[in-house]
Amino acid sequence: MDPRGGLLKAELDLGNEEETDPLLEELKIDARRDALSLTDYEWIAESLELGGRLKEALRWFTIPLREVDPLDVDPAETVCLNGRYRVRRTLGMPMDAYDDVVADSVREGVRAQLEDR
C-alpha cells in the first residue's frame, strides 16, 4: 500500500486543503502510470468520501474500472465497486452498468441467505 493514502486521510481529517490537493496531483500521476494498487484506489477514494469530496471520491473509485467491461466484473475481485455504488447513490446519480453489478450481487446474496433458512 502506498503510504500517501494514509497521509491523504490525515490531511483531509485535519482540513489541510493546501496539502491535500498537491498530494492528490502526485497520486494522479502515479494512477496514469498504473503504479497504484486496487487497495490504494480504495483508500484514496474512501478518504475523499469521508472528507466530503464525493465527486473526487467517485473518480478514484472508478479509475481502476476504466478498462473493465461491466459484464465481466466479478464484485469479489473489484473492491472499488461498492464504494463507487455508495457514492453514486449519495450523489443521486442514476444506476449504470457497474451499479447493476453491485445490486445484482446484493440480490444474489440475500436470496442465498433466504434459501439457507
Image (spheres, rainbow, N blue to C red):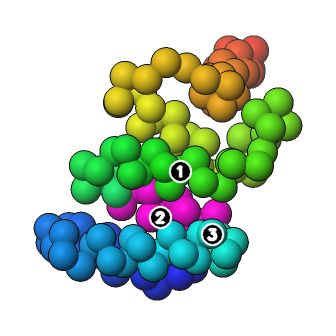
Q: In this picture, which residue range is highlighted in magenta?
A: 38-47
Q: Quarter-wise, where is residue 12 in the image?
A: bottom left
| Residue 30 vertical position relative to residue 95 in the rendered view, above or below | below
Please report whichever mark, 1 or 2, sits nearer to the chain's N-terminal start.
Answer: 2
Q: Nearer the viewer, residue 36 or 30?
A: 30
Picture quarter with the N terminus: bottom right
* Image spot of residue 71 (x, y percent): 82, 30
Please report whichever mark, 3 or 2, sits nearer to the chain's N-terminal start.
Answer: 3
* Image spot of residue 33 (x, y percent): 67, 75
| Residue 53 vertical position relative to residue 88 in the rendered view, above or below | below
Q: Kindly give the residue lying farthest to the bottom in the view shown.
A: 3
Q: Quarter-wise, where is residue 115 in the image?
A: top right
Residue 116: mark: none
* Image spot of residue 74 (x, y percent): 79, 41
| Residue 94 vertical position relative to residue 11 in the rendered view, above or below | above
The 10 Å Cα crowd at callout 2, few under 14, some 14 to 19, many 20 or more, is many
Picture quarter with the C terminus: top right
What residue is disc 2 on? Answer: 43
Magenta residues, dominant SS class: helix
> Which three-letter amino acid code belongs to the residue tagged 2?
Trp
User: Dot 1: what SS?
Assistant: helix
| Residue 80 vertical position relative to residue 11 in the rendered view, above or below | above
> Which three-letter amino acid code belongs to the residue tagged 1?
Phe
User: Dot 3: what SS?
Assistant: helix
Q: Quarter-wise, where is residue 105 in the image?
A: top right
What residue is disc 3 on? Answer: 32
Mark 3–mark 2 Cα distance, whole angstroms, equals 17 Å
* Residue drawn at 46 percent across, 84 percent down: 3
The 10 Å Cα crowd at callout 3, few under 14, some 14 to 19, many 20 or more, is few
Mark 3–mark 1 Cα distance, whole angstroms, equals 14 Å
* Residue drawn at 78 percent across, 45 percent down: 68
